[in-house]
Amino acid sequence: MERAERLTWAHCDPFDRIIVATALERAIPVVSKDERLDTVPDEGMQRIW
């Protein structure tokens, strides 16, 4: 996914990057207890849980 490649987020897990990129593209929150997702430097990213 092109959006996942363009993320400036330092997190290297490809699956997390795909989840975040998909959430950003669709403008939906991510449901996860993983606090590392809070470090995404995009203001549109929202984590619930």
Image (spheres, rainbow, N blue to C red):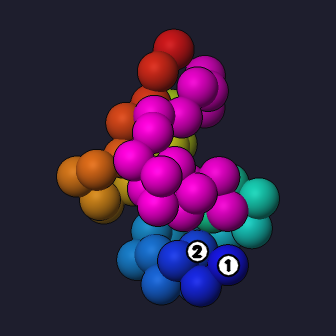
Q: Are marks 2 and 1 in contact (CB under 8 Å)?
A: yes
- Give, as a three-letter code, the residue at label 1: Met
The furthest residue to the left? 43
Secondary structure at numbered mark 1: loop
**Distance CA(mark 2)–CA(mark 1):** 5 Å
Q: Residue at x 45, y 34 (%)?
A: 29
Is residue 39 visible in the rendered image? The answer is: no
Q: Where is residue 7 in the image (x, y as percent from the top left)?
A: 46, 75
Residue 17 drawn at (x, y percent): 63, 63
Q: Give the range drawn in magenta.
A: 18-34
Looking at the image, is 40 positioned above or below residue 38? below
Which residue is at 67% across, 78% downward? 1
Element type where label 2 sits in the image: helix
- The image quarter containing residue 30 is top right
Name the mark on residue 1: 1
- Work out which residue is located at the far front of the displayed protein and give it: 26
Q: In this view, does 33 lie above or below 30?
A: above
Q: Nearer the viewer, residue 28 or 41?
A: 28
**Within-10-Å neighbours for mark 1: few <14, some 14–19, many 20+:** few
Residue 9 or residue 21, whichever sits in front: 21
Q: Where is residue 26 in the image (x, y as percent from the top left)?
A: 48, 52
Residue 47 appears anywhere in the view:
yes
Q: Which residue lies furthest to the top in this view?
A: 49
For residue 4, the mark is 2
Compared with 37, 7 (above or below) is below
